[in-house]
Image (cartoon, coloured by chain):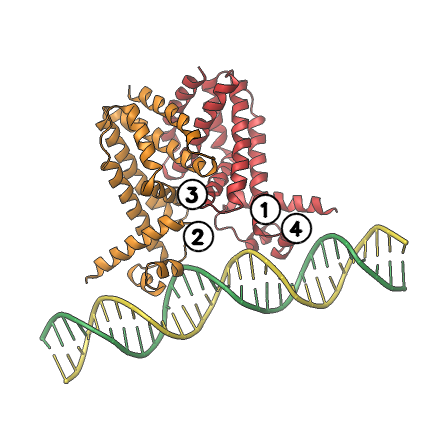
Chain colours: A red, B orange, C yellow, D green
Amino acid sequence: METSTRREALGDAATDYALEHGLIGLSLRPLAAAVGTSDRMLLYHFKDKDDLVAAVLRISNDRAIAEIRALPRAADVRRAVSDLWDACTTGQLERCQRLYVQAAALGLLGREPYLSVVRESNQLWVGALVDYLVDAGATRGRARRAAVLLDATFMGLMLDLAVEPGPAALRRTVRDLANAVVAITG
Amino acid sequence: METSTRREALGDAATDYALEHGLIGLSLRPLAAAVGTSDRMLLYHFKDKDDLVAAVLRISNDRAIAEIRALPRAADVRRAVSDLWDACTTGQLERCQRLYVQAAALGLLGREPYLSVVRESNQLWVGALVDYLVDAGATRGRARRAAVLLDATFMGLMLDLAVEPGPAALRRTVRDLANAVVAITG
DNA sequence: ACTCCTCTGTAGCGGTCGCTACACATCGCC
DNA sequence: GGCGATGTGTAGCGACCGCTACAGAGGAGT
């Protein structure tokens, strides 16, 4: 068993755990126990906790982007927004988004490795959104502009989602957002 | 010196500290030292750490809302969005927003007291936004609908703000958002 | 003057944290 | 067979955490 494979397996398992239990209070011993190893081993395969967290964030982001890319293309831009929202608020993708929000919140304290990884992840993520909008009929330049708005609003709505009683209350806002995106993409 | 006054003074000082150093890694001893007391005293005036944090969040939110209410009324809705963004990204109000984002991120782990306080704060905050939009000429019902979009997008942009190189890159998005708000408020 | 009640300082408990020293196992290689 | 490199378990270090027991200081009420 080469070292890289073992490291990757641990990274994947740790990502599952982080998606489940959150990133903010994360500590090595419970995580290690959950993935069937010890903190000692995690720190053998990853140089320190930050190294592990950075790996987890990258893996989570990769998964999220893969899910977006696996989405069937939308008939038009308006549907694209609606479908993206549905995708981002169900299943694994929702947890990835929540993890990202937590990392971003940690990042705005200026702490590494969060800041760098979040910056890198965000670029890839917005890129995936742009491609999805382009597939739905938008031109590349306008899609980029719309994707920034889309990304920001989704993040904010994710935060509200935990607070609001039901997801239905936010649907209208998503429709308003879709109108805005349509207006941008022309 | 009545008990309530002392408690309020400590709460204010603790809020200053939290706005400066963030909420997520917050611990009592450094905070106490910074405000010239001891952890022992904080836990005398507040029943536990959660009680203190809840107070801090409320105070921060009150300050933020007070700043919004003190803003001169905007000439129209489009300017209102722009002025709100300027206000939310400068000075103390920016730090209040950042604190709120951190609390919300902690809230989406389902942890109390964050969830309850964030829910309560958000309601008051959106109310202030609605009033500001109404003052700028929007009707109440439409203003409410626009304020939800406004709030969510601002939150998301705050997260991006720490990541993006300069605030200028987000200005265009704020303009796009302003168009959307104008479209909603009619 | 005496007591009670509010406030504060000291000191420390029990626990968790990230991380590491050390011993041992296993395995390929010469 | 010897031997270094790689992986793993045990045990624990020092630091920090939220929180509390305890004693005392000071002032108000009687």
| Mark 1 in CB contact with mark 2 (< 8 angstroms) | no
| Residue B3 placement, left or right of A93 | left
Q: Mark 4 lies on which chain?
A: A
Residue beneath label 4, please? A45
Q: How far apart are marks 4 and 1 (CA)?
A: 12 Å
Residue B25 image label: 2
Residue beneath label 3, please? B105
- Residue A167: x percent and y percent? 40, 32
Secondary structure of residue under mark 1: helix
| Mark 4 in CB contact with mark 3 (< 8 angstroms) | no
Q: Mark 2 lies on which chain?
A: B
Is residue A63 visible in the rendered image? The answer is yes
- Residue A120: x percent and y percent? 55, 36
Number of marks in picture = 4
- Image point 34% across, 65% down: which residue? B40
- Residue D17: x percent and y percent? 43, 60
| Mark 4 in CB contact with mark 2 (< 8 angstroms) | no
- Above or below B184: residue B119: below
Residue A172 image-quadrant placement: top left
User: Of the residues tagged 3 and 2, which is closer to the observer?
Assistant: 2
Q: How far apart are marks 1 and 2 (CA)?
A: 22 Å
Discs 4 and 2 carry the same chain letter: no
Is residue B113 visible in the rendered image? The answer is no
User: Of the residues tagged 1 and 3, which is closer to the observer?
Assistant: 3
Residue beneath label 1, please? A14
- Above or below B41: residue A30: above
Q: Earlier in the sequence, mark 3 or mark 2?
A: 2
User: Of the residues tagged 4 and 1, which is closer to the observer?
Assistant: 4
